[in-house]
Image (cartoon, grey):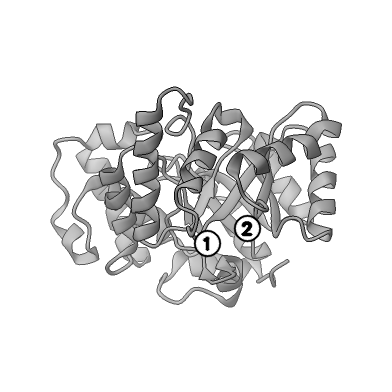
Amino acid sequence: MTCPISRRTALGLLAGSVTAPSHAFAQAAAWRGGPIPKIGMGTWITFDIRPRDEAARLQRVEVLRAFFAAGGRFIDSSPMYGMAEDTLGFCLRRLPDAPVIAAGKVWIGQAELGAQQIENSRQLWQRPRLDVMQVHNLLQYDGHIRTLRDMKARGAVTQIGITTSHGRRHADVARIIETDDSLDTVQFTYNIADREAEARLLPLAAERGLTVIINRPFRRGALISRMQGRPLPDFAAEIGVTTWPQYLLKWIISNPAVTVAIPATGNPVHMTENMAAMSGPMPDAAMRRKMVEAFKAAS
């Protein structure tokens, strides 16, 4: 586990500048080969491709190539996502030297079958191990977390954690974070329109020094569609932003409690555009507030 900081310190950091993250945040982001890049990759829907559609799968190889070329490392998937894990294996076999941090999930109603499902995922990914394992949407949390603790103790996984999405079950996630000292990671929804996590989950995760993984940064594209055809605010150039997807992602990753956001795309051009959000100046707290107000005004 990483070294916790006090709630007061965490709240101060969330309210202040993001240019100097705390020791706990730095620890949470650290990984072999350096910190986790702030933009990762999700695979829900976009990588759910049948093997017979080889052309679409080969396009996903190019998505991953663009991801790694821009410095990406962290990839998140789940057995819940149809053929996504199988598609990832197809792609990664064609990119054998890719510096992947593989984040999987266990998602099965029988806790005694969790280890079998995890092994199946590992084989589909074509990886010697999955680096992060998460209890997906808290399904059978009590049983699955015991399996994950055992895996971590044996060195079969580096970090373990829990997930939720769509703003659901925040109270349950907070309770588990407060009572389960074995957790290393937590994943939940956070974006410029869904900011409920600021009230409790982000400060709590910061206090515990957890790796924080952000899903649904675009609300499955709905936020991008909402802003289509609308000009960016003039100040966007000050933070190196040229598109709305970059604007939305940079707002998320500039929160000092956030380790990595995981947008999903099946388009290599969009992947390159997403990854550019890591470049240029990062907004401080005042700029982040300004970004929220400009988003509200434009939408």
| Amino acid tagged 1 | Ala
Position of residue 36 relative to residue 295, above or below, is below
Q: In which quarter of the image is the C terminus?
A: top left
The numbered mark, 2 or 1, whose residue comes first in the sequence reads 2
In percent of width and height, residue 272 lies at 29, 52
Q: What element carries label 1?
A: loop
Q: In which quarter of the image is the N terminus?
A: bottom right
The residue that mark 2 highlights is 205
Residue 74 in the image, given as x and y percentages of width and height? 51, 55
The amino acid type, in three-letter code, at marker 2 is Ala
**Residue pictured at 22% horizontal, 37% vertical:** 227
Locate residue 278, reporting x and y percent.
34, 62
Tell me which corner region of the image, top left, top right, bottom left or bottom right, holds residue 9.
Answer: bottom right
Give the vertical position of 275 relative to 31 (above or below).
above
Mark 2 to mark 1 CA distance (whole Å): 7 Å
Question: Which of these two is toward me, 66 or 96?
Answer: 96
In the displayed structure image, the side of residue 275 where residue 168 appears, left or right? right
Near mark 1 (Cα within 10 A), the count class, few <14, some 14-19 or many ≥20, is many
Question: Which numbered circle lies on residue 257?
Answer: 1
Q: Do the residues labelled 2 and 1 touch (CB within 8 Å)?
A: yes
